[in-house]
Amino acid sequence: EFEYLFTDLRKTHNQGVFDVYSPDMLRCRKSGVLTGLPDGYGRGRIIGDYRRVALYGISYLVRERELQFADLQSRLEKGEDLEATIRLREELAEHRHALLQIQEMAAKYGFDISRPAQNAQEAVQWLYFAYLAAVKSQNGGAMSLGRTASFLDIYIERDFKAGVINE
């Protein structure tokens, strides 16, 4: 009876997640195009996209938040969806502040992560700074780096072909 209650009458976390995936999402998940989906980690896990710091650099990410923030000005002035607009502007301001803190932390170690990573070593380092900042802000609880191997492989393969690194 216990098994019946928890298999027939209750959904598991993964059953609930898979129930909402579209066929396209399932194919992308299976092929590895989409990673870090909630079925792979369960409830309560935090899986940030730490690759963005290496891919874009902090300056670009900050600039994007500033543009998004400015784009909300007309909605704010017109009073359109005021609660959501104010909340989003606050979140964007917090994102900007956090990104600048990550940049400041990296600078203390002698790294300029304002720009995109230019090689494999920088890609690993920039990714790690983003992950470290997230772990510090959450006290390390339920943090996953996620699947970053294929992302880093692009930098490693490029450096390997250019003779920058070897086996």
Image (tube, rainbow, N blue to C red):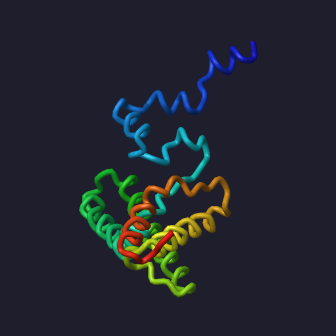
Task: Look at 62% across and 56% down and name the residue there.
Answer: 143
- Image vertical order of residue 101 relative to residue 151, above or below: below
Q: Residue furthest right?
A: 2
- Image vertical order of residue 142 relative to residue 66, above or below: above
Number of marks in picture = 0
Task: Look at 47% across and 27% down and name the residue there.
Answer: 19
Q: Nearer the viewer, residue 77 or 54?
A: 54
Residue 38 spot, x, y in % from top left: 52, 42
Q: Nearer the viewer, residue 164 or 72?
A: 164
Residue 90 spot, x, y in % from top left: 43, 64
Task: Look at 41% across and 70% down and name the residue there.
Answer: 160
Determine which quarter of the picture holds residue 43: top right
Q: Nearer the viewer, residue 36 or 31?
A: 31
Residue 137 spot, x, y in % from top left: 61, 66
Q: Nearer the viewer, residue 67 or 114?
A: 114
Task: Look at 53% across and 80% down and name the residue there.
Answer: 106
